[in-house]
Amino acid sequence: MADATAEFMNAVPQGINVEQIADQPKVVEHAISEFVHSFIEALAIVLFVSFVALGWRTGIVVALSVPLVLAIVFIVMNAMSLDLHRITLGALIIALGLLVDDAIIAVEMMVVKMEQGWDRIRAASFAWESTAFPMLTGTLVTAAEFLPIGFANSAVGEYAGGIFWIVAIALVASWFVAVIFTPYIGVKLLPNITVSHNHDPHAVYETRIYRLLRGMIQWCVNHRVKVVLATVGIFALSIVAFGHVQQQFFPLSERPELFLQLRLPEGTAFRVTEQSVKTAEALLKDDKDISTYTAYVGQGSPRFWLGLNPQLPDESFAEIVIVAKDVEARERIKARLEKAVDDGALTAARVRVDRFNFGPPVGFPVQFRVIGPDTRTVRDIAYRVRDVVRQNPSVKDPQLDWNEQSPYLKLVVDQDRARALGLTPQDVSQALGMLISGVPVTTVREGIEKVDVVARAVPSERLDLGHVGDLTVTSRNGVAVPLSQIARIEYSHEEPILWRRNRDMAITVRADVADGVQAPDVTNQIWPKLQDIRASLPPAYRIEMGGAIEESAKGNASIFVLFPLMVMVMLTLLMIQLQSFSRLLLVFLTAPLGIIGASLGLNVANQPFGFVALLGLIALAGMIMRNAVILVDQIETDVAHGLTRKEAIVEATVRRARPVVLTALAAILAMIPLSRSAFWGPMAITIMGGLFVATFLTLLYLPGLYALWFRNSLEESGRSEHIDLAPHHGESEPVIPLAAAAE
């Protein structure tokens, strides 16, 4: 770019300078470096968990799956023309906490079978035979959770739709790596495990920790009603606690730009607006926290970012885009500007200091639209709404999007006098147009450009409204007639702009919110207080909510409309795997329980719940159901091989404990780098809190729920029921060859 600028400057006249006011490549480079830093941190955490829990050689097997999965993801992204940006980069970090799960499950199973005396080839084969399809079902169910976001027909879908594709690609790739490459790498790298000839294959699960866990699970199975009722009670409390979580659409951006917006009375001349801009620039001059600032008079800045809300051309509007040196400097500049405005620095204009917000453009965060057929009535209602909004201590500068009338000069031609002098209204209009606005009389050529030469009256005559009547109009017989002789000049006011919505007049009462307060919460606080006004509205008049809460509702609606498709896909996948309506419903009942941990995490961390946190809640439901699918499949496999259902519930859960805890721990800790992000923080907290609680629910609540669901057949074994829900492998094992380690 520097070379192109230098070449361009060689061709322009002396005295013209070009200065760079924005550097988007630098912003992209910062975002990429932030992702790489967070990704390396998350990867190091995941590998640390693997090394500590499984040993360093086993950890290496898990670690090698990560570059393989990422290589597949990047190849597919390139083939699908998916770019690296904030959404796709964040989705990769989300996927990092999930893509090692399948590898951990597969390699943990190999280690367990080798500890039970199996050779490494047979153990590796068993990893494929017993877990491939349950893991595939769980993987596809988790990916299907994001399907509504990928196909949402809204601004939210446009902004965040890439999450579905990245997560789906990464999860499917992780499954392929886990069932094909991980067993092969395990055969090559796993250490030899010596087992005595009389070694009990089930001794691995007879340690002190496993015995304690087995006792807890047996207690939950025996007291299943208490466990289920307690969980339902905790779930109800979490719903109540969720009501105390702040609501949010999208969080503030970490970009360094500030927008200083000046709104003067409608009809203000361009030069007056320009003078106010110069006054504002004096406040910014020599500020060491500012890199650059650029003023736009009569319009807003170009839409150089997807989340930027463009402004219509308006001579009474101006905007100064301030680029701070960093986010901390941005906040210092904002505080100084707001203090200067409060002290009366820019009294000629209504001033707004705004930051970037992630997500689709919203404008003012708090908005209420007053709609009706008559302009005056709509304005009167809007005044009353503004008074109510002003009473809320969290709002700043409530205003109307259009209100004040602009002065205008009206010329009323006296038809009789004009005809007596041989003039028509058209003659008067043409003469005034030439005197005030001017008309092209010729053109001159300068280089390859044609320049119009405009003839009009001198500024002292045409710009002084007090002497408009002294302008002369030439009649057809050549007599100069003063304008005041043939016309009457009237001064009045008119509406400079009329906003309509579905052909009705609409005035929007809008306001900013104080820092640390979420706009949807403020809107919900104000809405009930407008009930008296809404109840007294005449027919054909109404008040609607706008701003962040409306855009959030639009985004959520575009997602919820696709929920039936998502549920249908998930039901199909689960039915193929479980082949039972009762077990399918059992798995589905575990999905909402992520709200317990999510509510706890968001309240403890004081994080808001918005669209990004909703993504975390959706991902959480998929993770919980994936664990439930694999555990239920394990229980049914044990039952099919001779254990009573009660014994199968306990033993299958004991064997599932280590991979469940390891995968949950890896996913939770992998979210730590994201929890510091302004954009991804609420989602990371949602997943961390939800998955922490969901781990206990999987190991304690799900066995109790399963036992309650099948309470009439707990003592029956699979052979008497002829249940065969999974393929039989390793028939040479004496009791439960498949159940011994299938995860």
Image (tube, grey):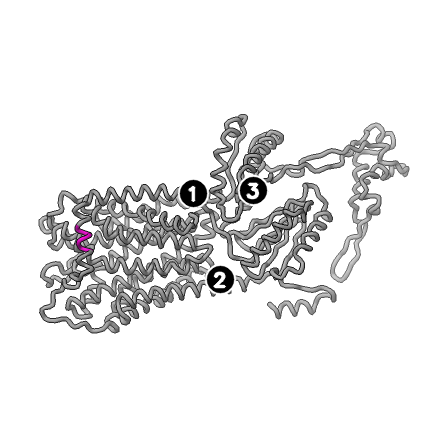
In magenta segment, residue 356? no
Q: CA distance from mark 3 to mark 1?
A: 25 Å
Q: CA distance from mark 1 to mark 2?
A: 30 Å
Amino acid at pointer 1: Ala
Estimate the x, y position of residue 212 in percent, counting from the top left.
19, 56
Is disc 1 surrounded by few (<14), some (14 to 19) or many (20+) residues within 10 Å? some
Mark 1 highlights which residue? 557
Estimate the x, y position of residue 275 in percent, counting from the top left.
72, 50
Estimate the x, y position of residue 593 in percent, counting from the top left.
30, 47
Mark 2 highlights which residue? 31
Amino acid at pointer 2: Ala
Mark in front: 2 vs 3: 3
Give the residues drawn in magenta, as a range: 213-218
Residue 499 in the figure: left or right of residue 242 = right
Mark 3 highlights which residue? 511
Helix, strand or loop under label 2: helix
Amino acid at pointer 3: Ala
Helix, strand or loop under label 1: helix
- Seen at 17% across and 63% down, the residue is 204
- The quarter in which the C terminus is drawn is bottom left
Give the quarter of the image for residue 668: bottom left
In magenta segment, residue 215? yes
Q: Are marks 3 and 1 in contact (CB under 8 Å)?
A: no
Give the quarter of the image for residue 124: bottom left
Q: Are marks 2 and 3 in contact (CB under 8 Å)?
A: no
